[in-house]
Image (tube, helix red, strand yellow):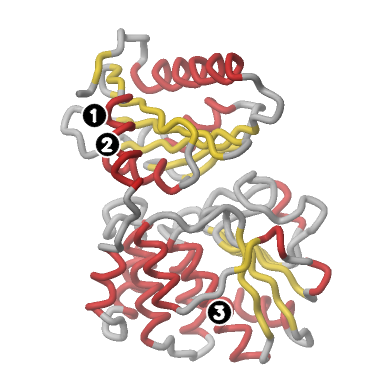
Amino acid sequence: MKKSAAKLEQLKAVLQGHTTLLIVLQDNPDPDAIASAVALRKLANTLFNIQCSIAHGGRVGRGENRAMVKYLGLNLRPMDQVDTVQFERVALVDTQPGTGNNSLPPQVEPDIVIDHHRCRPQTRLCRFTDIRSRYGATATILTEYLRCAKIKPDIPLATALLYAIRSDTQDLGRDTTHADIAALTQLLPVANKRMLSQIQHGIVERDYFQMLGDALKNAQVYANAIVTSLGSIDNPDMIAETADLLLRDDLTDWVMVYGCVKDKMLISLRTDQEQLGADAVICRMVGRKGTGGGHPSYAGGQIPLNGLSGREIKKLEKKLISRFVRDVAGSSPKPEKLI
């Protein structure tokens, strides 16, 4: 908490005297990004009466994420409809400059970066940074800020922050610190338990089942790893959701799920064997072709596909799968169908 108290004072110095703040999330934001942004807005509103807008690229596709946005009554703005010049301060939450997973124009240097992933070189150039890669969720950092500022989150915000921490740590089962547990303990008495359940079991669109069926049909087993493609999709959240599901297979230690969304290939890795590090594996896989990052048990990457033909994309897929299997299985076993 001492670090959060000191960081809060630094954050106040960056915000003081300003009236507008743009909070930018990762593309296709998850609960951690959404809740953290709302908490930062609460801080800015309460401390300095700053008017905030929250924006992101992509879409909110996963049922739980849409349920959270609806519950919070959020009006999230598409980044392609935002003029960053209109804002005196710009913040990145749960993402960083140069990661490739947010739509902040590259020429715009954010004033504030708060994240729980490994620190990027560009991040160090920003006015205010708080990067805690050991934390299970960015929401934990923002919960500590609220406590240091003596701001009690209202029920919707407490519920969102609690769900965010539970979601990113899989109910404290992965990449969890004492700080995450302390934040969860603080938020639990305030949160709406019924709403937590409704968010967790958010309704899904009909095409969810078609995409899930395709993913299972395409799934290939390489010894201790499963690889599958969702093809071309318009709901990027399905990639991570499918990866989470496939890791439940009792004979599987590693999962790679990928799909093409507009002009990018998106990849999600999951593992319960953290020694190798999913974040390290994804970086080796994408190399200089794209960007990647995450945590030892889960990670993601993206590769631009601009100008690539269908044949070239197929060649790229084979290369990525080969690198992944060689890294996590130690050989190139013959694939078998999952079902």
Residue 194 image point, x, y percent = 22, 78
Question: Between residues 40 and 132, which one lies in front from this camera angle?
Answer: 40
- The tag on residue 252 is 1
Amino acid on which disc 3 is placed: Ala
Question: What is the CA distance from the residue labelled 1 to the residue labelled 2?
Answer: 8 Å
Of mark 3 and mark 2, the one earlier in the sequence is: 3
Mark 1 and mark 2 in contact? Answer it, CB < 8 Å.
yes
Residue drawn at (35%, 46%), measured in percent from left and top? 207
Q: Quadrant of residue 191?
A: bottom left
- Of circles 3 and 1, the one toward us is 1
- Of circles 1 and 2, the one toward us is 2
Label 2: few (<14), some or many (≥20) within 10 Å? many
Q: How many marks?
A: 3
- The tag on residue 246 is 2
Label 3: few (<14), some or many (≥20) within 10 Å? some
Mark 3 and mark 1 in contact? Answer it, CB < 8 Å.
no
Q: Quadrant of residue 55?
A: bottom right
Position of residue 293 in the picture relative to residue 11 (left or right): left
- SS class, disc 1: loop
State the residue position of label 3. Answer: 5
- The tag on residue 82 is none
Question: What is the CA distance from the residue labelled 3 to the residue labelled 2?
Answer: 40 Å
Question: What is the CA distance from the residue labelled 3 to the residue labelled 1?
Answer: 42 Å
Of mark 1 and mark 2, the one earlier in the sequence is: 2
Residue drawn at (59%, 91%), measured in percent from left and top? 46
Question: Between residues 14 and 251, which one lies in front from this camera angle?
Answer: 251
Mark 3 and mark 2 in contact? Answer it, CB < 8 Å.
no
